[in-house]
Image: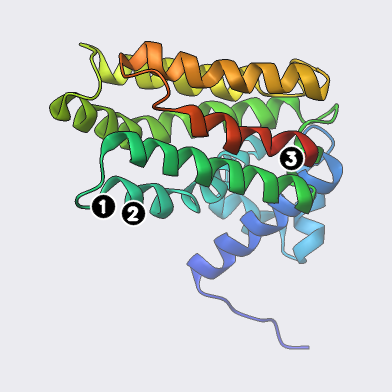
Amino acid sequence: MARTVKRPEERRLEIIQAAANLFSVKGYEKTAVNDIIQDIGVAKGTFYHYFNSKEEIADAVIQMVIQESIPVLREIERKEGVAAVEKLLQVTEAFSAKATQAYRDGLMNHLHQEGHSVFHQKMKVQMIKDYVPILTSIVEQGVREGQFHTLYPQQITEFLLVGLHFMLDPSLFACSKEQFNEKVKAVSEIYEKMLGTAPGSFSLVSVYLEELYPAQ
């Protein structure tokens, strides 16, 4: 059988997608480079032509997953005539919808299992790094509009993202549905106090985030 020759970008993407699938099924720690090579039927040299290590391809998988969300966030950020409070509500709704779908697809459940901790935490850190510039822009808009009151838009954004991603992570802080709902109710107040905006401005945040619990 003649060997299929693929363009470099196609081959690289094929390797990334195979790794993403294996990380989801077997876990990051239990997936070896040889597993990825065997899954797509390429030579070891082909793999190492594109990636130097399993850690490097993990970073590529993380970037692929995160980059799928960036256009959605950019679209919200660039909307004309939409107040910053509404934009942050739309961002929260988009995050919640994506996370809920990921739970239904099984991806998040896999990440929360033992053996996925390294990959899970690497994804969280990269996600926060990539999302902060976009959300900081929205917070800065809110400051210009007089809706938000802070001298530190970027630092506030980082704090909110880190807090949200870790406090509501069931693999780190297991809780009942009632306890989870108490947490998400607190998130609305945290948003408002951290950003210095009017009480009730972010009440819908709790509504969007409460939908996450059944998906867990």
Q: Residues within 10 Å of mark 2 (few under 14, many from 20)?
A: few
Q: Residue furthest left?
A: 144
* Three-letter code, disc 2: Glu
Q: Earlier in the sequence, mark 2 or mark 3?
A: 2
Q: Which residue is mark 2?
A: 75
Q: Which residue is mark 1?
A: 79
SS under mark 3: helix
Kindly indicate whether the residue at mark 3 contacts the one at mark 2 (C-beta within 8 angstroms). Answer: no
- Identify the image quadrant of the C terminus: top right
Real-space Cα separation, disc 1 to disc 2, in angstroms: 6 Å
* Three-letter code, disc 1: Lys
Q: Is residue 12 above or below residue 186?
A: below
Kindly indicate whether the residue at mark 2 contacts the one at mark 1 (C-beta within 8 angstroms). Answer: yes
Is 213 on the left or on the right of 8, as rendered? right
In this rendered view, identify the residue nearer to me: 11 or 193: 193
Residue at 25 percent of width and 34 percent of height: 137
Is 190 on the left or on the right of 120, as rendered? left
